[in-house]
Image (cartoon, helix red, strand yellow):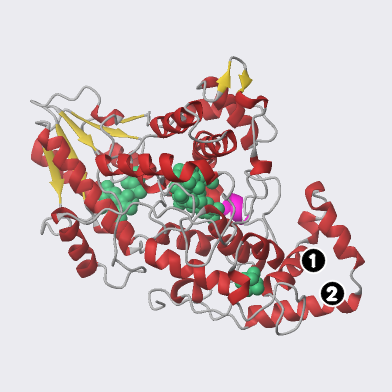
Amino acid sequence: GGTLRLVLGDQLSHSLSALDGLDPLRDTVLMMEVRDEATHVRHHAQKIALFFSAMRHFAAELAAQGIRVDYVRLDDPANSHSFTGEIARAVVRHAPARILATEPGEWRVEDALLALREELSIPLEIAPDTRFFATRGDFERWAEGRRGLRMEFFYRQMRRDHALLMEGEEPVGGRWNFDAENREALPATVQPPAPPRFAPDAITAEVLALTAREFPSHFGTLDGFGWAVTREDALTALDHFIAHALPRFGDYQDAMRAGDPFLFHAILSPYLNIGLLEPREVCAAAERAFHEGAAPLNAVEGFIRQILGWREYVRGIYWLKMPDYARSNHFNATRPLPRFFWHGQTDLACLAHVVAETRDHAYAHHIQRLMVIGNFALLAGLDPAAVEEWFLVVYADAVEWVELPNVHGMALFADGGVLGSKPYAASGAYIDRMSDYCAGCRYSPKEKSGPKACPFNYLYWDFLDRNRETLARNPRLAMPYRNLARFDEARRHTIRADAARFLDALEPAQAGRDW
Ligand code: FAD
Ligand code: DLZ
Ligand code: SF4
């Protein structure tokens, strides 16, 4: 009767709390490839392959340390294909005295573990996930009694608590936030570094074949799969980012360029989210680059804020507000997901580029997600649940604790302002300023109405007009509402007509038959 220790697909860290104090003579680690997890939403093929291959490599590392690993493969004929079914079977195989898990990354999975606990005759303990800077309890204590839960204040507290970029009580450089310097467009002459890609080894090749065979209709290409699937390779990716991209990460953080999805971004989120890298070491590496003079403060502060601030903050919000959080729908948006979200064929060049890059890489950077896809979904009034499912499917880094607050809160404002203070709504001018997409588009960001007008333009005003009741009192939207008030009735009518014509022509997605 030792301990049965669970390691889920996003928990591939040797420091995992579920592995704490492991006794190799008595304990067993249980890892499970189950169909339920691959299909409860129909994940991008690269995402499934990344999870399975990284799981298999992690299991091999544990085994090499003399740890007994019970690894249930997807093609095991006895596989029940659910976490709870596999844990129940493992209890029969190993007769453990207790089960130890680490907090999962999804409310749905924790709910299932808690339900299972009621049925088991042995204890099932769920230990905190210590890989994050803040525990769920830390965030609850921070949030308690506050009227607004603004990221910026949480971030400052985290900087102090973890002594990152601090000089005593003061932030390095005298300011907490250098974002004002991080909004440059990308000049055509600047050439970003190519991110490292890792050629599949035998384990990954087997998983790629398995994924292609078992999930043939899932969105996304598998060709050119180049993700790191081991900690060693993920560390190489981290070093590469620090040396080659971090120095200009800040300057071009918000820029977009057709055909170049990676720019100066880290491409580290999948590794952080499945556990191959830990947030502390990633922030420490960035801080070191600053102190060594290898990267400027605006880049390093901006990067650390994403991980120490945003990443921890959205996790806090998720666990504080779930499960009700997912159900809010501030604008009562109900439009179905358009079909082009899957097949990518649309005249809106910005959206076509981002969908195609997402299909090919299971990646898009923050501004593509927020200001192209998210902005479109917001302005078009797409059903938040449908948009959230899409985001959970398509990105290799999408685990619900981080995906949901970013989509539901930041991009769609469906939470009515828990996470952000105003919706990130923008017209075509924003996309034109931050990208080169518009040059290759049949629409023009300069035209406001008619067949050549960029749809983001009239959708933007239509969105503000439509949601006047809920938004007009927001002080951060005072300016656009003042502008809208100056439009005459004829112009308002044209906006409504253009928007209705565009939206009515959108072909809705049909589950499973769209790409
Ligand atoms: P970089 O831009 O180089 O940033 C560095 C790191 O900071 C990232 O690796 C990530 O760990 C962290 N980070 C940056 N922004 C955020 C953020 N808003 N929230 C949490 N962490 C952040 N991130 C995910 O990890 N999973 C998701 O499913 C996800 N869905 C998103 C959906 C929408 C609509 C939006 C607007 C953002 C989403 N993000 C998500 C946040 C962000 O877009 C990605 O973390 C980032 O694009 C990952 O690429 P990168 O590693 O190159 O990031
Ligand atoms: C995303 C995913 C996939 C595709 N497959 C598995 C799996 O077979 N086994 C597993 O343990 N986890 C998988 N995951 C991740 C889970 O869906 C989920 O995000 C985390 O386990 C939550 O902690
Ligand atoms: Fe996108 Fe509008 Fe620019 Fe076309 S004109 S690429 S639709 S922003």
Residue at screen point 10% across, 35% down: 64
Residue 86 to residue 185: above or below = above
Residue 505, percent from left and from top: 61, 83
Instruction: Give the left or right position of residue 60, taking residue 7 as reference.
Output: left
Query: The N terminus lies in which quarter of the figure?
Result: top left
Query: The C terminus lies in which quarter of the figure?
Result: bottom left
Front residue of 51 and 187: 187
The residue labelled by disc 1 is 465
Q: Secondary structure at mark 1?
A: helix
Q: Amino acid at mark 2?
A: Arg
- Tell me whether the residue at label 1 lies in contact with that at label 2, contact meaning CB atoms closer than 8 angstroms: yes
Residue 151 to residue 249: above or below = above
Residue 115, located in which quarter of the rendered image? top left
Q: Secondary structure at mark 2?
A: helix
Residue 375 to residue 228: above or below = below
The residue labelled by disc 2 is 492
Residue 33, percent from left and from top: 22, 52
**Range of magenta residues:** 408-412
Q: Is residue 121 magenta?
A: no
Residue 157 seen in this snapshot: yes
> Which residue lies most toward the top here?
168
Q: Earlier in the sequence, mark 1 or mark 2?
A: 1
Residue 222, percent from left and from top: 29, 66
Residue at screen point 75% across, 73% down: 446
Residue 304, percent from left and from top: 52, 35
Q: Amino acid at mark 1?
A: Asp
Instruction: Tell me if mark 1 has few (under 14), some (14-19) or many (20+) residues whose alpha carbon lies within 10 angstroms of its own.
Output: some
Residue at screen point 38% across, 66% down: 360
Q: CA distance from mark 1 to mark 2?
A: 8 Å
Residue 244, located in which quarter of the rendered image? top left
Residue at screen point 48% across, 68% down: 355
